[in-house]
Amino acid sequence: MLADNGPLMVMRQLDLLHADDHEKLERFSHKQSLMLFLDGDDALEKVRGDEPFCHSGEARLTLVHRTLFRSTTR
């Protein structure tokens, strides 16, 4: 997703990540210059980046957990 303040990736998290996996994701997001969030059951965990937002006219809209689209590939 491309927010007004940069690219954003939200990854669905089914189980807790090991510390080394979390660190790899953080390095990946830094290398790719993107905001990265993990989607848990009830909230987003910020791994890296600022709060994503977009504008509609003159209104600034903050993207929150319930406003993000989900895509599932099987």
Image: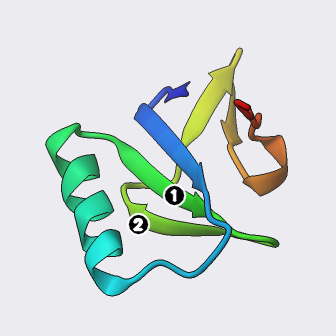
Q: Quadrant of the N terminus?
A: top right
Residue 22 - label: none
Give whichever of 33, 39 is nearer the camera. Answer: 39
Residue type at mark 2 is Val
Would residue 35 appear left or right of 20 to someone viewing this image? right
- The residue most toward the top is 57
Mark 1 surroundings: few (<14), some (14-19) or many (≥20) residues within 10 A: many
Q: Residues within 10 Å of mark 2 (few under 14, many from 20)?
A: some
> Which element carries disc 2, helix, strand or loop?
strand
Where disc 1 sits, the SS reads strand
Residue visible at 51% across and 57% down? 37
Of residues 39 and 60, the one nearer the viewer is 39
Instruction: Give percent across and percent down for residue 2.
Output: 50, 24
Residue at the (32%, 84%) spot, across then down: 19
Q: Quadrant of the C terminus?
A: top right
* Residue that extends furthest to the front in the rendered view of this protein: 74
Instruction: Pinpoint residue 38: horizontal percent, then vertical percent.
Output: 56, 62
Measuring 84% from the left and 50% from the top, which residue is drawn there? 66
Nearest the viewer among 17 and 2 is 17
Compared to residue 67, the image places residue 27 above or below, namely: below
Q: Which mark is residue 47?
A: 2
Proximity of marks 1 and 2: CB atoms separated by less than 8 Å: yes
Q: Amino acid at mark 1?
A: Phe
Please state if 71 lies on the left or on the right of 20 as rendered.
Answer: right
Q: Is 32 placed left or right of 6 in the picture?
A: left
Image coords of residue 32 (percent x, y): 22, 37
Q: Quadrant of residue 65?
A: bottom right
Residue receiving disc 1: 37
Q: CA distance from mark 1 to mark 2?
A: 5 Å
Name the residue at 74% across, 34% down: 72
